[in-house]
Each structure stands twice: as C-alpha cells, then as structure tokens.
Image: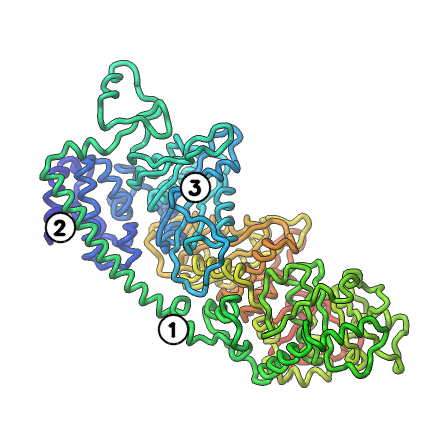
Amino acid sequence: MGLNLLSHILSLKLRTTFISYVSFGESSLVTPCTSNRRAFFLECFSHNTSQSSCRFLVNVALIPIVIVKSRVQLYLILLVRYCPLWAKEASPHGFTFGFLPKRPLWGLVTRSYNAYLSRADERLGIQVRVFDRHAGYLQHVMDQIVACTQRENLLPELSTQVTNTSRSKRLLKVVLVTSLHPEYSVKLKRMFWEQPTSTGESIEVYQPSEERVQQTDKKLHDQKALAEVYLLSLTDNIVTSARSTFGYFAYSLGGLRPWILYKPVNRTAPDPPCVKAVSMEPCFHRPPLYGCQAKTIEITPFVMTCEDSNPGLKLIFGYVFKSLGLKMKILITFIFSSLLIGSVILLSFSNNFNDQLLDATLNGSSESETSHDKLIGGLLKAGFDEGSCVSRYTKSLLYRKPSPYKPSPYLVSKLRRYEMLHKRCGPGTEAYKKATEQLDENQVRSSDKECRYVVWVATEYGLGNRIISLVSSFLYALLTERIILVDQRKDINDLFCEPFPDTSWLLPLDFPLMGQIDSYYKDYSRCYGTMLKNHAINSTTIPPSHLYLHLLHDYRDVDKMFYCEANQAFIKNVPWLVVKSNLYFAPSLWLIPSFQTKLIKLFPQKDTVFHHLSRYLFHPTNQVWDMVTSTYNDHLSKAEEVLGLQIRVFSTPSGYFQHVMDQIVSCAQREKLLPEVATNGSSQVINTTRSKKLKAVLVASLHPEYSDELRKMFLERPSSTGEIIQVYQPSGERVQQTDEKLHDQKALADIYLLSLTDNIVTTERSTFGYVAHGLGGLKPWILYEPKNQKVPEPPCVRALSMEPCFIRAPLHGCQAKTIKTTHFIRPCENWNLGIKLVDAPDKFWWW
C-alpha cells in the first residue's frame, strides 16, 4: 500500500505531461501491467508471482528510472516494453506514442517470444550488421562476436570435459541473433552443440529471420525487422554492431546499455573486440560540432563522444543524477534498496518453489534417478561404471513416457547367458587365442567348438544401415550361441560404449584376417554364396575355418540361401562367420523353423525385436550423450508435446524441394500432428497472449531449409488452435559425411533425440528413421516417395509396427511360400519388395 502511494505521489509531476498523449486512469498510471499480467514483464511471469507481487515489481522497477531520467519518452518506452498488450489496446490502429506495433506484427513478437525465449533463465541479444561492401558471413566478424561475449562473460567458454548430463537442473541461456545472414547463428549454435560449456550452462541459439538482403519498404520484411527490434529489447543483455541504427532502437527501447562491437579494420577482429556503452541513448552521427553549438558541446556534462562513432554525440546519465538534491538522492537510494530486497525475496521464493517442482520431475531429482527403471526391465545388467558411460543407466530418464514394451524373462535370461559366453570367449581370453589360431588352417578342428564367432564388418554405408545390420547380426549370434565381434576401424568407439560387462565387443586390430576382410565380396572364394554357386559344398564337405556372408542389398539368390533351414545345418559348424550387411534381415530369421521357436519365446510381442535389442546394445558415449541431453533439456523437455520430423531426400541432386515441404505439411496437418495456420482476419491474429500449450517440432535433415520454412510458417501467422509451435533443428550438415567423427556423432544424437518424441514422421526407406522410431518404440507416419516432383495422395501412411523394414527380403526361393503364409510377416507399407514384423493375431482376413 505504501509503495503504491509513493508511486502515485512521485508520478504526479509527470502526469500533466502524459495527459496530452492519452488519458490514463490513476490505476493505469500506477500499475499499468496489472491489467494484463501476461504481458512481457519478464521476471513477473517467468516466476509465476502473484498479482500483488507483480504490482510491487512494476512500481519499484518503474519509478526510480522515471525519476532519475525525468523523460517522458522513457516512461512510454517502459509501457511498450512491460505492458505492450495494455498499451496496444489503447491504440489499436498502429504506431502512436512510443511506437506501438499493430496487432499482426505483435503476433510475430509474442509467438517468437513464447516459443523460444520465455522459458530461458537469461537472454542475450546479438545484433549483427556487416557494413563491409562484401556483406555476408565473415570469419573475423564471427571471431569478434565470440571474443566479445566470452571476454565480457556474456557467454561461457567451451570445455573439453563432458559433465554429468543426467540432470536437467542447468541454467538455460538463450541467445537471440538478428542478422541478414544466418551463418552467424548457425556457427554459434554449432559451437555450443558440439562441445559442453565450461560453466555447465545450456546455450540455445535462435534467429527469427534470415532475409540476406535488406528490403526496406517491403511490408513483410519491415514487419519482421520491427519484430526483431522488439525481441532484442526483451533480452537481459545486448551486443550490437557499431553505428547500427537497428541496434540503437532495440537497446533504447529495452532500456539496456549495450556492448558495442568496434568496427573491424583490415578484416581483423579488433582488440578489444567491444566496449560497454555509457548510456542507452542512440548516437547522433553527424552533430554540428562547429558553429553556434561548438562551445556548448564541449562544456555540457551530459553529452559525450559516442563509443562507436567519432564524430558523434550522445546523452549520458551522470549529470542528471548529480544535479538532484540530497533528499531526492536518499529517496532514490531507498527505493532501489527496496527493489533489491523485494526482488531477492520474490526470486528466492520462486527458485525454492521451482527447485521443489524440478526435484519432483523425472528429469531432475535424485529420487527419480534411483526409482526409475534404469535396468530397463532387466535388459541391462547392473555393475558398470556409471561415470564412464552416463547414458547406459540414465537414457530412460529422458523418455517422456515409460516404454509399454517389457522384455520377456526368457530374453533377460538369454542375455545373461550370452554375457557369460562373451566373457569366456571374448578378446584377450585363451579361448579367443585358440580360435584365432584355427584361421591359419583350411579346415576346422573338431575339438575346438566351444567358442564360435560372428565378425561384423562396417561397410561404407551410413550410420542407420550399420545399426540395423548390427542388431540383425547380434540376433543371429544370440540364436546360434555365437559371440559377436565388431569392426572398430570406423568410428564405433566414438559413438557407443561397450555393451557387455567385463569384456569387449571390439574386434582386435591384430585379428588375423584384418588385412583381408575389406576386400571380401561376392567373388571371394570363401563367400558362402560363391561356394554354393561353384558346388563346393555338399553333404561330405568339411566346414572351413571361416565363411564370408554377403548380405548386402546387392546379394544374389545364392547368397540368400543363407536364410534356408537346410543351409544353416552346414553354417553352424563354421567357427568364424564374417558378415557384411546394410540390411535389417531379422524378419527372415523368424522364417527359419529351427529359430522360430526360440524367437517366439524371446519376443512374445513380435514387433519388439529391434526396440529391445537396440536399447540393450547401444549406449552413446558421454560426448554424444551430452549433445542429446543438452538439446533435449533446452528445447524439448518443457514442451507439452514433441513431434519428430525426419526428412531424407533421395533425389539427385538432393536439397530443398517445395513439393517435399508441401508433403510434410500436408501429412502433419491431415494426421492432426500439427495445427493449421489461422487465416487472415481470424480472431487468432488478435489473441497474442501466451498459449497454454507448447508443441515442439524436432527436425532432422541434412538440409536446414525445411525447418526454416516450417518455423517461418508458424511465426508469421498464428496456429488455428492457439498452440505455440517451436521448431528446432540440431544440425544441418547438407552433405552426408559417413566416417567423419563429428558428423556421425551429430547423426547419432539426432537419432536419439527423434526417439524421445511423442510422435514421429519419417521418410520412406530411410534407415535413419528406422533406428529412431525403433529405439523410441514409436509407430511412425511414413512419407510416401514423391513421383514427378508432385505431392503424393495421400502424403503419408501410419506404420503397422515400430519394426524396421527388410527392404531386400528373399521373396523367392526357400522362404517364398513361408513369407506369404506367416501371419506376423507383412509387406512393408511403403515398399512392396520388403517385409516387416508385426504383432498380429493368428490370422489376417486378407491372407
């Protein structure tokens, strides 16, 4: 009550000035924000304070600035910044006092703020304007931005140490970048995604638009520009380019003293890179330094030379404060002290509340970490060093819902027996040494049958192909009492932790056949298909010490005889099987009679093979897992619903195609995965208050244009449902770079992030998508392949199961009839040449 009265008294002197602009009621003058507490008074709403607390913050924050500055413009700026919706209601037809934006434009601001900025603990604005005649991305400008923000402690430095990422209780700092050139935000985002920060903070980078060319007087361009000005004004700190009037408007509107980037000389980052402005006033670039004002300029204490322009003048704060009387200074000191104490109390209460809430959530609390099913229903074995592989026991924490698919007791016991076998026969053991000695002989010794092996060789195909073939090879090893050894010459060590306790699944580099296996192909004399073709195998043939199984997509009918029951009788006696594959051939293992009985016991729900085995085998390394957890906690964890979009363009050349974009939108809206955008004139354009529902869209694609267009679509116009749509793409490499370490790590992080979504849309025949929805236990919507660059009708279909498709199934030969009569095998939804597992009843009506 006392503060309200004090506010009223102190503002009486200014009220006569404001009356000429608009007639304010007393309550509006004293506590203007309370008429709409969803306006952008950031501290008030981010901490969910009560109406009385909001009233307190508005009064205390507003009054001393008004008194000290004694300027009408600042009061109006504060109204626009802290009470934009209230002020807009007073002037609904466009710009009046204080530059109040029209409603459609304000929708751009609120949608961007609510989707990308509102949930941050701290916001940094970076306004980049390149005045070089070759404007665009310049590395020295990027270096200058990084040097400035890190030197001034606005952004943290990077760390080579991966922190424990199992908890989401980290400070989230959002960096809002405004520039005609998107490369600056892309580089900054990549920088903080690829490595953790030294402080443990999560850094999220967002750029609302990327026009590349200034298009003054073009309506939409100017609206986007003004929206960015207002968004910059809502940050906590701001860095601007020298002599940029765009930056002047933003930081003055927000009442912020910026850090100003010095203009580079000779394309070299200046040292120091930036300077803190002495006031929030714009610079007068061309002042009358000579003539009637020359002497006055020199002796006026509240005018100084601009930090970023000489000649140039600006107003400063110090003189006005010095000119105040002692009583007024004491009063201002009292008010600021009250503000500080009250803010500390409010923030302390809010932080305690938020900490308690966070400690009750799945992502944050130690209680949840101990009570959650970290062994995934017994799939995993306890006893691993948790620090060396954080993801092993914590990845189930990130899933929004526990998996409804539980591993069978038989599968759990089978995995424990396999682990004992692997420990007995794995690298470094006497049994392994004896088994490798056999490779120097042409035939197997009958006495050495205790340990048999499947050697999985990494091919030149992508990460998705490798993962699905590795799962299939492991399943075969599990069924045939073999152990699997994995070719480590690619980057598998940089992607995954060891899956088996007290042993290794990595094929030693001194393996006797290591120098030869790269050349193994269909024409190799020990290739099983070639031996059949040459009639080198019959009932009396003694098994060789090793066989090569060619199970790549280009395999021949003779290679496909591997899937025949009769042939397995010979293969089971070969100690070493070297496998090359880029296919998910697990469905055909179900069609081998001697395997089917075991498989039914292992997987009573037949479409859970990949889901269970992938979660058992694959545990991302700490570096990859840090990418996953930081992205999830920053962008996805606070959304009420998350949609994953996996976009692969198989055409040549690849890239952005409008018909693909139209197909994605058509599928997502037809299946009610995304809302439609409101039409012009809809009431949704007027309603710019914060939505109750935030839906995040995670896009995984080599081409960032798809996420850019989707983001623009939902920023430029509101959704018909009132939902806030946030679009995020972790990486956009443009070109697949298999076996390049960092590229593969980003790809794996993208896969796991997609698996954490509530719903997922994937591209036809994409193994990347297969792995993502299989890991997550999700039945995807599959985009049909476009024909003649036209959107298919319908654009997509819901998958029958979460299992990957075996896209080169042996439709002819020994399994031809069985495929047609087995009720849990069906043709793939999007590929007639493939088959997949489904969890089906005994019979289908269509068989």
Q: Amino acid at mark 2?
A: Asn
Disc 2 residue crowd, few under 14, some 14–19, many 20+, Cα 10 Å = some
Task: Look at the picture and state if 378 lies above or below 285.
Answer: below
Task: Look at the picture and state if 200 lies above or below 371.
Answer: above
Gap between marks 3 and 2 measured at Cα: 38 Å
Q: Which residue is mark 3?
A: 178
Disc 3 residue crowd, few under 14, some 14–19, many 20+, Cα 10 Å = many
Q: Which residue is mark 2?
A: 4
Residue at the location (47% across, 74% down)?
A: 402
Task: Look at the picture and state if 478 lies above or below 727.
Answer: below
Q: Is residue 845 left or right of residue 399?
A: right
Q: Amino acid at mark 1?
A: Glu
Q: Earlier in the sequence, mark 2 or mark 1?
A: 2
Q: Which residue is mark 1?
A: 367
Secondary structure beneath disc 3?
strand
Residue at the location (79% across, 69% down)?
A: 548
Residue furthest top in the image:
291
Eye-nearest disc, 2 or 1: 1
Q: Is residue 840 left or right of residue 196?
A: right
Q: Amino acid at mark 3?
A: Thr
Secondary structure beneath disc 1?
helix
- Note whether residue 669 is visible: no
Eye-nearest disc, 3 or 1: 1
Residue at the location (70% across, 81% down)?
A: 481
- Which quadrant would the C terminus be assigned to in this image? bottom right
Gap between marks 3 and 1 measured at Cα: 41 Å
